Amino acid sequence: MSQAIGRAIIIVLDSVGCGGAEDAAAYGDAGADTLGHIAQACAEGRGDRAGLRAGPLRLPHLDRLGLGRAMQASTGRAAPGLGVGEPAGQWGYGVETSRGKDTPSGHWEIAGTPVDFQWGYFPETIPAFPRALVEALIAEGEISGILGDRHASGMTIIEDFGEEHLSTLKPICYTSADSVLQIAAHEEAFGLERLYSLCKIARRLCDPLNIGRIIARPFVGRRKADFIRTSHRKDFAMPPPSGNLLARAAQRGGEIVSIGKIGDIFAHRHTGRELKGAGNNDHIDLALTTLAEARDGAFIFVNLVDFDTDFGHRRDIAGYAACLEAFDARLPEIAAALRADDFCVITADHGNDPTWRGFDHTREHVPILAFGKNVVAGPIGRRDTLADIAETIAHRLGLPAGAHGRSWQA
């Protein structure tokens, strides 16, 4: 039976995992559970913050799509206040097969091309970066030196070295358990374009090391107490594997809209019209505007990064819970913007449990919720690769099948 072709939209709730994966122990993450631990913390009052939120985690619209059921299927445990009623969407959970637990590997697998190579990482030593890399970055970037040179949380290291950076203009370089080199610099004193240029040099220098991303982290402020990162973050990623969903849509000549940091994650390859705002609400607004204008057959790919950057890495339970509730409150707008044959998938790329030790991502399963006006509700079960999302979208849009995964609607 032929199927009318509407639009397809993937919304990635960056880091909103739903329980430790089978290989979590290999990453030091056995027992991590981003959504489950947030729900439990909120039920116990540990997610309360005056003027922000209080009480149990309230996600009625996500739960109506099947979020609570997906969480329980992933972990075997019911989450407080979730899993209520019969879901009105398709629900299940996905298992990441890619190596690593960072943004590119998760997104690339969602787009149909799991990572089958080993990323490069920097050791947990001080200094963390190879001497030859640092010397080349200093020489080619025409800087007098670097600060940091260690594993660190982003705002913490800016607070620690920001004032010295302002007096010396040496950029702050740091990494994490992910395959990443981050460079922080003052947006005005050092200069935004100069920071981007330095990151491009670092990107080339790190290619032989298989480092997944170089991230520009501009900030403003004059002293430790008032430093704040700006919305002009920019990621310089390795090119994605060939044959992903974006490439297949582009080859067919379809309309593609990438919202948030999708363009950066895919190194601006086949990412169509790229739209970027200052945070989740801006990106939801951009998605709604796109849904009002996009033609049938369009593919819209959205990343909502605030969960990860603002709350997961900072181990901020109350902030993360409030961010989830804020997205949930806007979900009816997204549903209302869908046309009869549209198809929307909400998922995540990895975990970042704010109750967990350290400040890094956590290796977890991710929820998969799918819905649309003519989408038949029900369980889709455990998906053994996130590439199943790409293949389901490809099936809906009439695109060629990829080499990995299978559609749950074929």
Image (cartoon, helix red, strand yellow):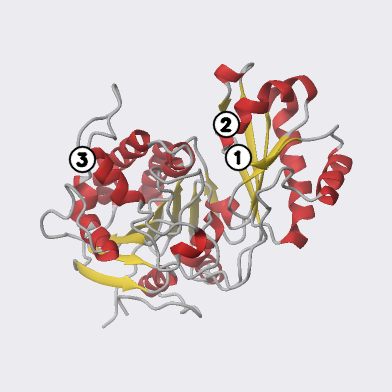
Structural crowding at the residue carrying mark 3, measured as other residues with C-alpha within 10 Å and reported as few (<14), some (14–19) or many (≥20): some
Q: Nearer the viewer, residue 37 or 308?
A: 37
Structural crowding at the residue carrying mark 1, measured as other residues with C-alpha within 10 Å and reported as few (<14), some (14–19) or many (≥20): many
Q: Is residue 3 above or below residue 66?
A: below
Give the spatial CA distance, label 1 vs label 3: 31 Å
Rendered location of residue 66, percent (x, y)? 21, 58
**Residue furthest left as drawn:** 85
**Residue furthest right as drawn:** 139
Is residue 2 toward the left or the right of residue 102 in the image? left
Q: Nearer the viewer, residue 148 or 172?
A: 148
Which residue in the protein does label 2 denote?
156
Q: Secondary structure at mark 1?
A: loop
Q: Secondary structure at mark 2?
A: helix
Rendered location of residue 193, percent (x, y)? 73, 35
| Proximity of marks 1 and 2: CB atoms separated by less than 8 Å | yes
Is residue 214 toward the left or the right of residue 283 in the image? right
Rendered location of residue 388, percent (x, y)? 40, 72
Q: Nearer the viewer, residue 38 or 410?
A: 38
Give the spatial CA distance, label 3 vs label 2: 29 Å
Give the spatial CA distance, label 1 vs label 2: 7 Å
Labels 1 and 3: the sequence-earlier one: 3
Quadrant where the C terminus is found in the figure: bottom left
What residue appears at the point 31 percent right and 35 percent down from the top-left corner? 322
Labels 3 and 2: the sequence-earlier one: 3
Q: Is residue 91 above or below residue 146?
A: below
Q: Secondary structure at mark 3?
A: helix
In the rendered structure, which amino acid carries the disc numbered 1? Ala
What residue appears at the point 58 percent right and 61 percent down from the top-left corner? 270
Which residue in the protein does label 1 denote?
152
In the rendered structure, which amino acid carries the disc numbered 3? Ala
In this rendering, does residue 49 appear at all? yes
Which residue in the protein does label 3 denote?
43
